[in-house]
Image (cartoon, rainbow, N blue to C red):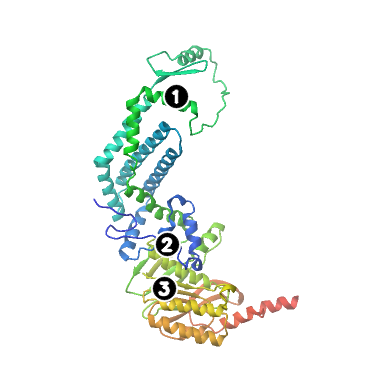
Amino acid sequence: MIFRSILYPNEEGGASAAEEPAFFADLNLDQIIDAITANKAEYNLKPFFYSPPGTLEAIRYRHEVMRDLEGEETFSAVTRFSLRMRRMREELGRSKKLYYKQQKEWWFLDAVTVYCEAVEALRDELEASEPKSRGLQGFRSWLIGYLASEEFVRLAQQAQRIASELTRIEYCLLIRDSSVTVRKYEGEIDYSEAVEESFRKFAQGEGKDYRVGFPEPVEMNHVEAAVLNFVARLYPELFSELERFCTEQAGFLDPIIRDFDRETQFYVAYLDFIRPITKAGLTFCYPRLSTSNKEVVVGDGFDLALARKLSESGHTVVCNDFQLSGRERIIIVSGPNQGGKTTFARMFGQLHYLANLGIQVPGREARLVLFDQLFTHFEREEKVENLRSKFEDDLIRVHDILERVTPRSVVVMNESFSTTTLKDAIFIGKQVMRRIIARDLICVFVTFVEELARLSDTTVSMVSTIVPGDLASRTFRIVRRPADGRAYAIAIAEKYRLTYEMLKERIRE
């Protein structure tokens, strides 16, 4: 049975990126991935989250595996395996750091024993859990073959036999003055047992144990090492066999097992991350993706980074629905400031990126696009060293995006050109939008330029809402409706502290 990866179908390959994508900070994906991988540093999982597989087949493959791991039995089997493998790595690492030869070899032997027990237990537990995914079924079939192979059988049998023989070694230690003699045990009486038996009849109930425990260092001291060296000379054949075993089996860890242990943590870490969020009442779903159909539908979507923070503090998370159907490609989001527009834009980008990773996404339902590239344009602080204004920098960055996009790209733009006049913002915004429309790509554009929503039948308007009768209270819901013409006016009023509430406050002052 050929098996390659639990993240990619056998016929496909996948390269993991070493660097974080440029848009991560804009979408708060950096916060999300940091939180997901926080307790899994030893596995170096971030490259997996930096690299969407890029095909529908690979995404379906991952969905199947994740559905299996949602089952408690399969999840527990993989978790127990990872704990055993962690112990194996610890003992293997310890064997490399120790100084004395026989002790190094013993820890190596123990690491091999733990490894053999781990893979055998995983086989049994996967057979009991009966996974349905191609990935876990394929790995289970490969694992059965691996455990039956001559190479593994020899490894397991040798390790078990040598360990068993070593634990049966008995020897006598004779100490007289400054000399120490080590010899084989020849059936001498164990006087410690005889003494304990003699005094046992005087015991009256359980006595208090006054012994003080001292920490046992892993590394032997020079006296212990000298004694062990004498023991090895008493049993030269067994210790020579142990030495040959350590040399011949130095590469005992199968790369498929090693990669399976690491790659399954991609799923485990994400499921661990979303578990408290689902307990808070929020829903995740398996998205449907397409490379040809550009209709987008999301129900009860939410910003995952914000949901993590709010759910931890017990606050309510506001969910939003949106859709693009027919020729619609672009969502123009407008409305009063602090109403959730930027959060909506981030949610849109997060949903597409997480969906393209092949994992569950925040929401009750999701039909999204399999993109080739994702671009973001969020406001940046002005940098003195590049000798450009914020407006000029905006233009250069947007130009770079338009040069690189394809019809399969997704673009998220937030408050672009907000530093210029309304007239210029309308003119430049229309020029940019016409180029985006011509490329037929999916886009979200948060802007105060509401005229952009009426530019084409490919654009739709969504507006952040306020509590009826209370201009200062936001609902954080973004609804599909024509812009009301007040977004820019409110933005200017807030900028110059001329809103009704601000004026009242200034009058009181």
Element class at badge 3: strand
**Label 3 or label 1, whichever comes before in sequence order:** 1
Disc 3: CA contacts within 10 A as few (<14), some (14-19) or many (>=20): many
Task: Report the Cα–Cα distance between label 3 and label 2.
Answer: 16 Å
Q: Which mark is residue 317?
A: none
Three-letter amino acid code at disc 1? Val
Secondary structure type for disc 1: helix
Tell me the tag on residue 410.
3
Task: Confirm or deny contact between disc 3 and disc 2 (CB under 8 A).
Answer: no
| Identity of the residue drawn at 47% across and 72% down | 376
Q: Can you name the residue that lies furthest to the right here? A: 509
Q: As rendered, which of 478 and 157 lies closer to the eye?
A: 157
- 281 up-or-down from 401: above or below: above
Residue 482 place in picture, x, y as percent: 49, 82
Which residue is the site of mark 1? 227
* Residue at horizontal 42 percent and vertical 66 percent from the top: 353
Against 228, is 289 above or below?
below
3 or 2: tag closer to the N-terminus: 2
Q: Is residue 85 above or below residue 168?
A: below
